[in-house]
Image: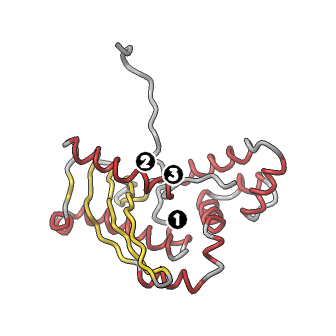
Amino acid sequence: MIRQSGYSGALRARVVWVWVALSTAGLFPAWGQARQERDPVAAAAAETAQGYMRAMASQEFEKAVKLVEKASLESMQADQVEFLKAAPTMKHEEAALARLGVADISVLEKMTPEEVFVLRSKAQFAEKADNQELVQQISSTLKFQVLAVVKETSQLIHVLLRSSHARGEKRVSALDLVSLVQEGKTWKISLNAQEPQIAELTEPVK
């Protein structure tokens, strides 16, 4: 019972239709491979996206968290605490806390957002962590192809990646959509950008 956020299997299922909506709408400029190599903004965003995905796949969570924007980390911590407090029974809450490796919700509240991210990530990848040979195989064979970079606003960029890696005797390939926001002079991973956005209507629905 760990609050899910960031880039999960559910996200992969949304990648195609989200990307089609962005590209066919004709509202946002998309950079192809050649343009990415020339444009410093696209290149920086693509590099950060790949670095984050590689760090997560290699289970280098302390490295990955440095690439995530502060606001996303703070929101993730608050959501995790709220999620645990809303557990239907004490048994459910205790099981979730045990999986995270903490005794009480107050421990999570006292942690930094970065510490909570690392703790959650370790819990989510715990099963794979027991097989370090597999982790090493994935890490050493992981490759990315940047398919396109879309600039939605001056502060928000989406990177579409084709990732592939060896797993046992097979090669696994997937599409990954990574969103980044500008934090100071650098591009950081946003864990919230792909969440549904809800706002009040400015005009009555006709």
Secondary element under disc 3, as helix, strand or loop, is helix
Secondary element under disc 2, as helix, strand or loop, is loop
Between 201 and 1, the residue placed more toward the observer is: 1
Callout 1 crowding tier (Cα within 10 Å): few <14, some 14–19, many ≥20: many
Q: Amino acid at mark 1?
A: Val
How many badges with numbers are in the image?
Answer: 3
Instruction: From the image, tell me which residue sits under label 2.
Output: 193
Residue at image position (50%, 58%) is 9
Instruction: From the image, tell me which residue sits under label 1.
Output: 65
In the image, is 11 to the left or to the right of 79?
A: left
Q: Which mark is residue 173?
A: none
- What is the spatial separation of the Cα atoms under label 2 and label 3, in whole angstroms? 9 Å
Residue 119 location in percent, x, y? 65, 65
- What is the spatial separation of the Cα atoms under label 1 and label 3, in whole angstroms? 10 Å
Residue at image position (28%, 48%) is 20
Residue 131 location in percent, x, y? 62, 81
Residue at image position (47%, 56%) is 69
Q: Are marks 2 and 3 in contact (CB under 8 Å)?
A: no
- Residue 40 appears in which quarter of the rendering? bottom left
Between 160 and 134, the residue placed more toward the observer is: 134
The quadrant of the picture occupied by the C terminus is: top left
- What is the spatial separation of the Cα atoms under label 2 and label 1, in whole angstroms? 16 Å
Sequence-wise first label, 2 or 1: 1
In the image, is 180 to the left or to the right of 168?
A: left
